[in-house]
Image (cartoon, rainbow, N blue to C red):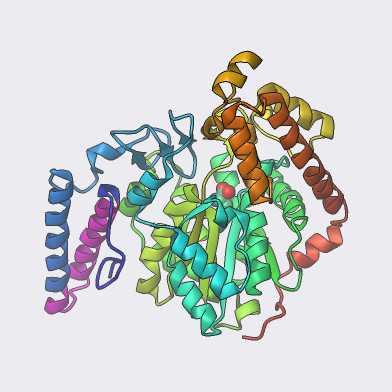
Amino acid sequence: MTDCQGDAEVAKSPLELYEQLTAQGDEVRTLKTAKADKAEIDAAVQLLLKLKVGYKQMTGQDFKAGCPPSDNSVAPNNGPAAVDADDEDTVDPWNVSTSNAKGVDYDKLIVRFGSSKIDKELVDRIEKVLGQKPHRFLRRGIFFSHRDMQQVLDAYEKHKSFYLYTGRGPSSEAMHVGHLIPFIFTKWLQDVFDIPLVIQMTDDEKYLWKDLTLEDCHHFAVENAKDIIACGFDVNKTFIFSDLDYMGATPEFYRNVVKIQKHVTFNQVKGIFGFTDSDCIGKISFPAIQAAPSFSSSFPQIFKGRKDIQCLIPCAIDQDPYFRMTRDVAPRIGYPKPALLHSTFFPALQGAQTKMSASDANSSIFLTDTPKQLKNKVNKHAFSGGKDTVEEHRKYGGNPDIDVAFMYLTFFLEDDEQLEKIRQDYTSGALLTGELKKILIETLQPMIAQHQERRKQVTDEIVKQFMTPRPLNFNF
Ligand code: TRP
């Protein structure tokens, strides 16, 4: 059965409906091949017809298998169907870009992906349930979208356990500040909820997608794990694993991967990820490997074979396609659907049209940058929303909405009042671009220096502890 049957999750975008239809078509075919009960086949066909009518109403087009809706054209290079006709935003696991200087239109993404907005009501509820101030990423809409977070809070209130899962694709040794966003937030979630955390290092994914050797990717996984550990995770509550190691070490993990693989068709992953006939088969089956840690039975050492512990995944919104697929599969293999918290992207120094990229040194502030390098990069490359001359700036004021230094401060400056004052002063022209950049530099320099100091303390022995499959300090 697919996600849409008797389920509260309603398709909101043509693409999502298209994916559901594709899945439902497969379902009907599977039932027929298996000579299933007539009533069951009839019910599946009825649903298929209903979805087709809905699709026609929404798009004005007839559903055709293999042809995604035309206002969601498939980008050529692995880009799934994620380009709207009325805007240029591209958001998928491999590409993020927009023509708008303010960045991606996140409200539209919520509609297109069919997720829910993290609104004031939800932030207030989080505050009430936790009895403490929500993280600045929640207060400022940096984590802006979710799936099933209300359900997670219900569970927490009833003292039901759940766990956190996030990950990182280790494509190089160099990590930049943008990479830390999900981990800074996950560390906060681990502290406030006091629950187990698993972190997947997809060295296999990077081997499949990039021109790197297996040894390189595994090495990057271990090196990146050091930067992740330096965010302050508790070794008694955190398991970090390299796919290349863990797949062979834990049969239960591979069994879940195979279960997922059996329940997703090539058609479905083509619709979701835009794979083509010339993509290697490793890529086509990889989404099952990123999906499997969403299920507690993949970690028998931690959950003692229990398969009913719910998972909460904090991630950047570009990872959502993987988890839409996961949520679709979950009920069909008898597991709870993972809940999600989605973040916006950390903008490149050059502007919010794209996210920071580790492969472009001038677009990013690296975790290894010296105070001087950091200062030069911000002063030279951070896109400014200020005016060309001091006179004009004083007269007309700057635009914080497109100013990268200001955007970075919204991520890292803790004090809400100070941030608001900076916004007002910059908008009025009282604060100059150079002065704004100076505030950013003075915020980032100690932060990066402290990170470097903590990373130095992370020995090979400590990494090994984090990466050893073992029970954590929780009773299941
Ligand atoms: N695919 C992700 C990347 O390239 C890594 C990843 C694996 C991940 N599992 C995850 C990210 C879960 C967030 C949540 O970075």
Vertical side of 146 occupied by 402: above or below:
above
Q: Dividing the image into 4 quarters, which one contains the C terminus? A: bottom right
Q: In this orientation, does residue 42 appear?
A: yes
Task: State whether residue 423 is above or below residue 5.
Answer: above
User: Viewer-proximal residue, 223 or 149?
Assistant: 149
- Give the tally of numbered discs: 0
Apparent side of residue 12 relative to residue 303 in the rendered image (left or right): left
- Magenta range: 16-40
**Viewer-side residue, 262 vs 179:** 179
Q: Position of residue 448 (x, y in %)?
A: 79, 43
Relative to 447, is 23 on the left or the right?
A: left
Side of 227 where 291 appears, left or right: left
> Does the magenta portion include 17?
yes
Q: Residue 328: image x %, image y %?
A: 36, 64
Q: Main secondary structure of the magenta part?
A: helix
Which of the pair 179/403 is nearer the observer?
A: 403
Residue 169 placed where, x, y %? Answer: 61, 49
In percent of width and height, residue 426 lies at: 61, 31
Quadrant into which the N terminus falls: bottom left
Q: Is residue 309 magenta?
A: no
